[in-house]
Structures are given as structure tokens and as C-alpha cells.
Image (tube, helix red, strand yellow):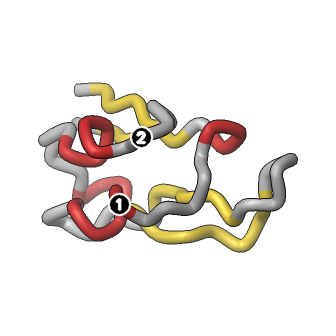
Amino acid sequence: MAKAEVIPERCSSCAFCIDVCPKKVLAFGEAVNSKGYKYVVSVNEDDCIGCMMCAQICPMAAIDVYR
């Protein structure tokens, strides 16, 4: 099973990953990182297909995808 893992301290809340995910696995969480950004979290983790589009579009390299 694939898994998209967000590194909270790198996330800058750009939402590119949320927009590009074909399965809507990612969304903004309620917590904020040390820079004051609401960071992205996996909300539908079981739906991840491991396409890596989220990791490829992330300008902060804040997402790792495991297959």
C-alpha cells in the first residue's frame, strides 16, 4: 500500500499537492508548524495510489511517498 508522508516543518501551505492529488488524499490539518503555516496532512491515506504527483510538485520537498 502506498503512503504520502508530509514533513510538517518543510510545508509552506502552498496547496499545490492538495490540488494535484487525483485521489484527494491530502488536505490542510489544524496544527501549524514553527513558521506559522497550517501544514498538509494525509486524510484519506488508504486511497493513496503512489503516483508521486504530490512529491513532484512540492516546491519545498516536504513530501515523501512510499510504496
Q: How many marks?
A: 2
Give the labeled residue for mark 1. 16
Furthest toward the front, the residue is: 59
Q: Could you tell me which residue is drawn at 28 percent across and 69 percent down?
A: 19
Callout 1: SS: helix
**Residue hosting label 2:** 59
Q: Is residue 23 left or right of residue 12?
A: left
Residue nearer the viewer, 45 or 27: 27
Q: Secondary structure at mark 2?
A: loop
User: In the image, 28: left or right of 51?
Assistant: right
Q: Position of residue 59 (x, y in %)?
A: 41, 40
Crowdedness near tag 1: few (<14), some (14–19) or many (≥20) residues, C-alpha within 10 Å:
some
Residue at 50% across, 37% down = 60
Q: Quadrant of the C terminus?
A: top left
Q: Residue furthest right?
A: 34
Q: Name the residue at 31% across, 26% down.
A: 66
Task: Kindly indicate whether the residue at mark 2 contacts the one at mark 1 (C-beta within 8 angstroms).
Answer: yes
Q: Position of residue 15 (x, y in %)?
A: 43, 65
x and y percent of residue 13 in the render? 57, 61
- Give the label on residue 24, or none: none
Q: Is 54 positioned to the left or the right of 14 in the image?
A: left
Q: Looking at the picture, which amino acid does disc 2 mark?
A: Pro
